[in-house]
Amino acid sequence: MTIFDILIWAGAALTLAGLAGIVWCIIAVARARKGGLDDAALRARMQRAVTVNMAALAASTIGLMLVVVGIFLKP
């Protein structure tokens, strides 16, 4: 296994982890909206979800970049 294969597989794993985080955000926000929380509690949960969403989006982006770099550099 070459370094390029490691880049591709690590990027794929990072992308899948980011995608799992995004799915978690969707589920968490849907549950919070249906939970009948007051405004302050809903706002606190949404802030946490937005933070996790941004981190998951960044992880997915970096993972996809690793996959592309690994494919382009592979001999």
Image (cartoon, rainbow, N blue to C red):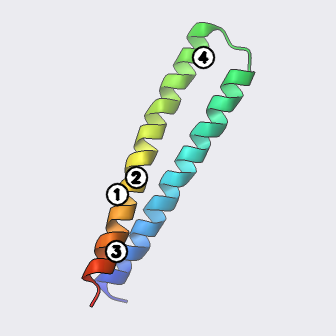
Query: Residue 5 location in percent, x, y?
Result: 37, 82
Calculate the distance from the C-alpha at mark 4 to the C-alpha at mark 2.
26 Å
The residue identified by callout 1 is 62
Query: Residue 59 location in percent, x, y?
Result: 40, 52
SS at badge 3 = helix
Graded by Cα atoms within 10 Å as few (under 14), some (14 to 19) or many (20 or more), the crowding at tag 2 reads many
Graded by Cα atoms within 10 Å as few (under 14), some (14 to 19) or many (20 or more), the crowding at tag 1 reads some
The residue identified by callout 2 is 59
Query: Residue 62 location in percent, x, y?
Result: 34, 57
Work out whether mark 4 precedes mark 2 in sequence or the reverse, and give the earlier one: 4
For the residue marked with disc 1, what is the amino acid? Ile
Numbered badge on residue 7: 3
Marks 4/1 in contact by CB < 8 Å: the verdict is: no
Q: Is residue 34 left or right of residue 65?
A: right
Q: Is residue 1 left or right of residue 24?
A: left
Graded by Cα atoms within 10 Å as few (under 14), some (14 to 19) or many (20 or more), the crowding at tag 4 reads some
| x 42%, y 39%: residue | 54
Query: Residue 28 location in percent, x, y?
Result: 64, 33
For the residue marked with disc 2, what is the amino acid? Ala
Work out whether mark 3 precedes mark 4 in sequence or the reverse, and give the earlier one: 3
Q: Residue 31's quadrant in the figure?
A: top right
Calculate the distance from the C-alpha at mark 3 to the C-alpha at mark 4.
39 Å
Q: Residue 67's quadrant in the figure?
A: bottom left
Work out whether mark 4 precedes mark 1 in sequence or the reverse, and give the earlier one: 4
The residue identified by callout 4 is 42
| x 47%, y 66%: residue | 13
SS at badge 4 = helix
